[in-house]
Image (cartoon, rainbow, N blue to C red):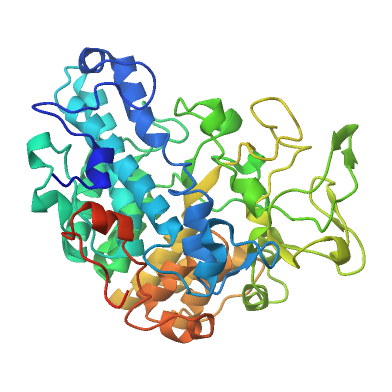
Amino acid sequence: MIISSLLIIAGMGCGKSFLEVPPQGKLTREQVLVDPDAAQKLAAGVYNILYDQGLLGVKWVVLGSVASDDADKGSTPTDNGFNTGDVDEFKFTSNTVIFNDVWGAYYTGIARANGALAILNESTIDEDLKKRLIGEVRFLRGFFYFNLVRAFGGVPKLDRVPQLSEANSDQFQVKATPEEIYNFIKEDLQIAVDNLPVKGTAGTQAGRATKGAAQALLAKVFMYLKDWQKAYDLSSAVIQSNKYDLAADYAVMFREAGANNIESIFEVQTGPSRATDGKCDAVSANFSNFQGPRAKGGWPNNVVDGKVYSGDLGFGLNTPSADLANAYESDDKRKNGTIIFINPTNPTILWDGFTIPAQNLVENQRYNYKAYHSPFKETIACNGSINDKDNKPKNIRVIRFAEVLLINAEAAMHVGQDALTPLTRIRTRAGLSAVPATEDNIWKERRTELGMESDRFFDLVRQGRASGLLASKGFTTGKNEVFPIPQSQIDLSGGKLKQNPNY
């Protein structure tokens, strides 16, 4: 009998799921059916996959940023960690490991969501709480599938926990079309919109999905589908809710001080802002370390306010490209909030006083400032060590109000509404004057506003510009618009799962 790994991940059973114990804690099915606290923890188990390296951690960053013109591989010339060099130069194949890692992470998330929904749908807890938790889990499942379809195109649609008797069913082995996946995403997110509370009302907390988060993500989905009226209506609803605004300081927004601020619509929680019952040893997954500035042969210790930090900051992967740096206008405040520029002759001092030596001791010329987590001015790792580089509690900003404004501007341009006002709000915060609300200007603003936030590759594909702008990196039209289906998944399906074109 052939059983694909996505089904093994999803869990199977004769009459009920193998997922008897939810991913978070030692809960039983019987507890979750009647106990509101247990039901909350069950939903938290779905959130806790978000920081997986393959889901929103460094491996997803490689696909969204390194594959684009926003970022280069970075690190040392011989370092191909996480297949960054293969992805950067489009030299990957279906056997390149990173794709199976990403695939597995997202289907693990989907399995958790399906397992949680199977129990929540039968629970007898308070009906309002039940609807909210179902809305949260369906928001997450919709998000997982949105990233899967952007990365791989059509993928198998697991809309529930498969039973053992269904192990070889084509329904769970064969790719659904992108259209079928997008319809499934829309259904999940609409349920979330209908059932989630508005930010700030009873039952909401930092890190949990809200009505605004579901509306914002659904607006983004409709933007990808070029359903401009729905993208406009949903983004307008988020704007008119008056629950969100642009943060005053762009750079501070990506620091601990900016966690869950007025601009945050959905972000992954860690450290002091963690609100999803996550475990200390699983909250950071090396996000900052892998992108931190890398030394050549060692650095002197840093001392700030009597605290001593030894050595460099990380592996230096995913470095901002010269092309991204040149995309910013000269007086754009976002440039230095996005990119750490290494001084060629003198030390570079970061916002917290951390000193990076001059270029001769540093591997790369630029680093991702949005990924930096201060060992001096922000919460240190869970184990209490200032020198634990691997477990820095860095929140990941997934959906910001600024992106909603940009979705609104792009959609408004297509449906004959005011695109200039939302575009100008973005530029005013950046210290820039207004420009006409043309497609090129809106797309340019998306790049400079969302730089290094792992969306650029997918933006270029949906805009139809990847073939031109990424040709010099090795992008092949008719092939690289999506990444290859992992060969190991095809093998496990017995060939039922088909490869994407030209791989």
Instruction: Tally the marks.
Output: 0
Q: Give the answer, above or below, for where 389 lies relative to 501.
A: above
Residue 186 place in picture, x, y as percent:
22, 54
- Camera-nearest residue between 400 and 244: 400
Q: Is residue 198 left or right of residue 373?
A: left
Q: Is residue 195 left or right of residue 308?
A: left
Q: Quadrant of the N terminus?
A: top left
Q: Is residue 205 visible?
A: yes
Q: Is residue 333 left or right of residue 56?
A: right
In the image shown, does 178 or 448 lie closer to the viewer?
178
Quadrant the C terminus occupies: bottom left
Picture coordinates of residue 172 (x, y %)? Answer: 15, 49
> Residue 369 at x, y = what percent?
68, 56
Is the residue 172 above or below the residue 409 in the image? above
Q: Residue at x 25, y 30 (%)?
A: 116
Furthest residue toward front: 1
Residue drawn where x is 47% and y is 66% of the image: 422
Expressed as whole percent of the image width and height from the top left, the position of residue 33 reads 20, 17
Task: Kindly identify the residue that appears in the image at 76 percent across and 68 percent down.
Answer: 365
> Does any portion of residue 454 appear in the rendered image?
no
